[in-house]
Image (tube, grey):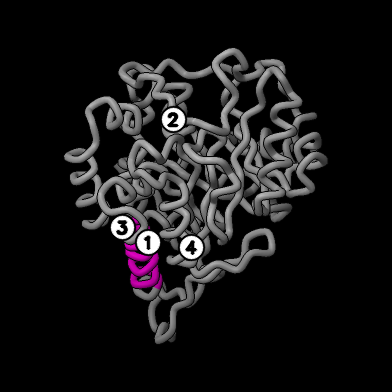
Amino acid sequence: MHPLLADHRSEAARVLSEEVHAYYAGGAGGQVSTGDAEDAWLRLRLRPRVLRDVSHVDTAVTLLGTDLATPVLAGPTAAHGLAHADGESETARGVAAAGSLLVVSTRASQPLERIPAGPWWFQAYVVRDRQRTLDLVRRASDAGATAVVLTGDVPYLGNRPGASRLQLQVNAPDDGDVADPSAGLEVIGDLAAASGLPVLVKGVLRGDDAQVCLDAGAAGVVVSNHGGRQLDRAVPTVDVLAEVVEAVDGRGPVLVDGGLRSGLDVLCALALGADAVLLGRPVLWALAAGGAPAVQACLEALTADLSHVMGLAGARSTTELRPDLVSPRRA
């Protein structure tokens, strides 16, 4: 783990209440998937190239038409108001200052209309009152979101021991309107039509799922096991990333989250074919530890770390990070 992220995590544990810390940190069931996430990236080893001109290393990427300084993005996490009084607005300021992009959760602490200017996408759940979902993605589009990230792995809420239902969610449906287990692939087109925005599907852990989502109109996918908070013992994302990338075959961007904690982790993800990575808990730790400046520092630290290890691996740009750089560790 990058030292700054470790410092933020320690400080967040100190300043957050025990209840809030448990809500942010906890996973589902026996927390197997949550525990696997960071260690899974450490199984990979690198095969660097030598004698390449790496006097200039460029971490910039373009996602769905948006130019970004970094492929390290802030993923959707709920209730930022529990970590900072200004909630998602504070997070957004730090993300924008780092030249990155924020994915705002349906279960945000603030109205979407309060998100400051800067690149952001909106994460959507499908609830039983389908019209409420459609109305919410329209609001997001009107407020400035440039894509919708449909979370597809929550037909029911995972069993999360110790994670209480903290109520600081102004965009989410009330408790009487819960996730719709009947939602199918048709939702992708419905959300795209309602918002006028590209829709990415989050929660994909299989190549065949990626293909059917794209066939149904998805603009891209996010390889994710929901931070270990849904189906415990779901595979670490690194174990299926290459399969999903192969299945997508360039038809849209592939993003990945889950346990990425260093520039080396990010390098491995990009080499395996991801177009960008999403940080979840590290952004919350930074927000709790120091607000927007700490969020900016978190993203910039991983970007600088990525730039450094790209140079050491012989890659001048993210497009030069290819699967032949990565080798699984042999027992």
Given residues 98 and 37, the one toward you in this image is 98
Is there a contact, CB below 8 Å, between mark 1 and mark 3? Answer: yes
Q: In the rendered view, would you say 108 is above or below 197?
A: above
Given residues 17 and 245, the one toward you in this image is 17
Residue 306 visible to an observer of this rendering: yes
Mark 2 and mark 4 lie on one chain; the one further toward the N terminus is 4
Residue wearing tag 1:
296
Using residue 145 as the reference point, say whether residue 7 is left or right of it. left
How far apart are labels 2 and 1 at the CA level?
24 Å
Please name the residue shown 73% across and 49% down the image: 198
Percent position (x, y) of residue 205? 56, 34
Tell me the magenta residue range: 295-310
Residue wearing tag 3:
294
Q: Residues within 10 Å of mark 3 (few under 14, many from 20)?
A: many
Please name the residue shown 24% across and 45% down the image: 9
Q: Quadrant of residue 40?
A: top left
Q: Residues within 10 Å of mark 2 (few under 14, many from 20)?
A: some
